[in-house]
Image (cartoon, rainbow, N blue to C red):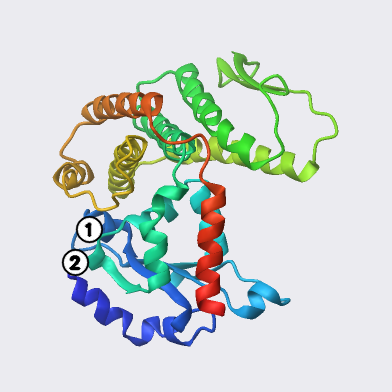
Amino acid sequence: MDIQYIKDKLNSSDYDFLRTDPHLGSNILILTAAGSVAYGTNVGTSDIDIRGVTIERKQDIMGLSSFEQFEDRATDTVIYGLKKFISLCLNCNPNVLEILGTKPEHLFVITKEGKLLRDNVDLFLSKRVIHSFGNYATAQLRRLQNALARDSYPQAEKEKHILNSILGQMEHLKRTYKSFTGSEIHLYIDESDREDMDTEIFIDINLKHYPLRDFKNIYAEMSNIVKDYSKLNHRNSKKDELHLNKHAMHLIRLLITGTEVLEGKGINTFREKERELFLDIRNGKYKYSDIFEMVDEYEQRFKTAAENTPLPDEPDYKRVEELMIEIYSKVLL
């Protein structure tokens, strides 16, 4: 997709909100292409995805108002408030870190403050990448593998894939909600009394004085994984096949990008070297058995990078805070 075409679209009435919304306009620090254009995997039918960062207004920072992000679903545009953006970056969220690693020619707005964020992306990087990139990718790939092999895998084997996906999500849950251990929430597979199942996943819970809302959210996230498997197991159309190919392409991309981050090479959103490979996967050139072999290879590279990474255990909170103060001071004072 031609960049000039996207620039022309951004100047059209469809994107008037960029200029008229009180949280956007001159407050935008970064506005960049996202999705397939940013990755280099776009095709003729690809949509335009736009992501960005905006600085909150004075009343949002010092007054009674609040602002976290702006979203326009019709154009697939998401623009984060600076404080929320930095919070997500500190957790090494892949979707927001990618904003700091897009190609310069994919930037439609970049202020001095936005450049400061991009120039200091290393401050946000830590071993949290292992979980944010790796656990998400491997869990999703195992779900994909289960869906594709549903006709040949026995029910008990599918149940193992579901359990592995949930266990892979556990590290995220432990960081997000009040801490718990494997002894407090224990998942395992055992014989089932259900007529249509040989085995199934069971849970032992031993929680005391635990926040009900946190537990509700933990249960909901685990339940969503089970529901997603059910949806994948009912795929039966060419459209679903194309969707799974695209899904596999992006998950392998995530493993490759995460490996580079763990190796200390920073965030490189545009994947020029792998572009042809990704498009071949998307277009169905590879058998799924070949894709799973690739997955095993890239997972091993990711694990090796994780074991030898020079990244710190935690991000540099002090310097990130200093960066935030510098940006807010420049804009507000």
Q: What residue type is labelled 2?
A: Met
Percent position (x, y) of residue 322? 54, 59
Residue 81 in sight here? no
Percent position (x, y) of residue 260? 30, 39
Task: Give the residue number, with chain letter if any, for mark 1.
Answer: 42
| Disc marking residue 311 | none
Depicted 217 relative to depicted 262: above or below: below
Discs 1, 2 touching: Cβ within 8 Å: yes
Q: Earlier in the sequence, mark 1 or mark 2?
A: 2
| Disc marking residue 1 | 2
Percent position (x, y) of residue 34? 33, 61
Q: Residue at x 29, y 52 (%)?
A: 269
Horizontal side, residue 1 vs residue 122: left or right: left
Q: Which amino acid does label 1 sit on?
A: Asn
Q: Which residue is drawn at 34% across and 24% down?
A: 304
Depicted 247 relative to depicted 209: above or below: below
**Total numbered circles:** 2
Give the secondary structure at mark 1: loop
- The quarter of the picture where the C terminus appears is bottom right
Of 46 and 298, the residue lying toward us: 298
